[in-house]
Amino acid sequence: MKLRREIILLSLLFATLYFVQGFAEPSEGLIAQPVRAQLRFLNVPPSEISRFSFLIGLPWSFKLLFGLTSDFVPILGSRRKSYLLISTLLAAVSLFAVAVIPFELQRLKTIFGFICAASIGVAFTDVVVDALAVSAGQKYGLTGRFQAIQWGGIYAASIVTGSIGGLLSQYHMPWIGFLICGSLAMVSLFMTFVVVREEPHDRTSGMGVMRSLGSTLKSPLVWTVGTFLFLWNFNPFSSVVLEDYMTKQLHLSEQFVGHTRSVAGIGSILSCGAYAVWGPRIPVRWLIHGSILAGVLSSLVYLLMWNQWSGLAVSLLSGAFYMLGTLVQLDLAARACKPESAGTTFAALMALSNFGMSLGIYFGGSWYERLAQWLGDVPQAFAVLVLLGSLATATCW
């Protein structure tokens, strides 16, 4: 009974913190579309918006540093709870601060600074929660199930944030999104304080963690998984390009773009449920090939989008395919980690994943503009970028 209660509490903690992350994460959460929409409203070109998005997402590429800090620099004997309290508080304060700043061109540097600080807080929280999930998942043999619960929480949030984000974008009210996300970050702070229990960490045990980390870094599996994650996520066909094409070429409203994000979230939730049940029963080799195919299809389906109804159908399929591929990556990464250095190792693998994604976003906006100029036709440029994105994922084979 005690074991069951502990698993339920951990599942609730992971689901809640990831649900909040789905709202508060600046590059893909509730504020992502309103911020990009406001930049488009201020006539900022797609290439500049891509760079802005790249920089906001950059803290996720430093997850290795966050993992090292959490694993090797305990605060008052705490490696997990202390950092969760600090990171969730940083995110909340930064989001509340940016909510009171007028979103104008001359204030973009200040706005960018606070959003980056919030991104650091959310990314650090993610690293520590992942370390808890990896350790608990390996302890109870539930790595895949905990990953499905976490990402189910994120995409449950995306079902809500998509439509709300579209509404805030339509009426140019990003500040409301900042206030909502700041409030939810306070919920994460409360859950951490109440639920997380941790044995005091002895600094002398750092040598054991270091040996575990050294053993992990020598593992061919870790390097293989890391390369796979980078290639799978380096995709120049990004949400910046997609939103620009939908609003300017297909003449769909910001509100409708938000609805497509919600529909994609529904597809992702379905994949999380399916993977939680059937994922552990499928051989790893087939999981790997299936994840590559799912990643390729998650981009290719956008060639079938031409109006509202097709946009909704494509978003549902893309969300389902993308989440299936992502869950396989996360499960593989979790299996490759040593529990003692889980924060550092898992963070390093996820940093490679996020860096590949950030590079794809960075290059995608400028490639889209250049292809449109070279081909003289924006729809053709969009189709070519979709194909390039699919090809980039296929290099995992």
Image: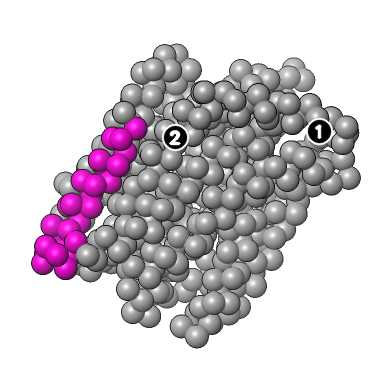
Q: Position of residue 64 (x, y in %)?
A: 62, 44
Q: Which residue is mark 2?
A: 227
What residue is at 42 percent from the left and 65 percent from the top? Answer: 51
Q: Position of residue 225 (x, y in %)?
A: 48, 29
- Mark 1 or mark 2, earlier in chain: 1
Specify whether 59 is left or right of 269.
Answer: right
The secondary element bearing badge 2 is classed as helix
Q: Position of residue 116 (x, y in %)?
A: 58, 64
Residue 229, above or below 235: above
Instruction: Report if residue 200 lies within the magenta region.
Output: no
Q: How many other residues sit within 10 Å of disc 2, few (<14), some (14-19) or many (≥20)?
A: some
Residue 258 visible to an observer of this rendering: no
Specify whether 23 is left or right of 87.
Answer: left
Q: Which residue is mark 1?
A: 206
Q: Position of residue 2 (x, y in %)?
A: 77, 20
Outermost residue toward the bottom in this view: 106
Magenta stretch in the rendered image: 371-396
Instruction: Report if residue 377 lies within the magenta region.
Output: yes
The picture quadrant where one finds residue 46 is bottom left
What residue is at 72 percent from the left and 58 percent from the top? Answer: 89
Residue 201 visible to an observer of this rendering: yes
Total number of numbered labels? 2
Contact (Cβ within 8 Å) of mark 1 with mark 2: no
- On-image quarter of the C terminus: top left
Cα–Cα gap, marks 1 and 2: 28 Å
What residue is at 70 percent from the left and 54 percent from the top? Answer: 87
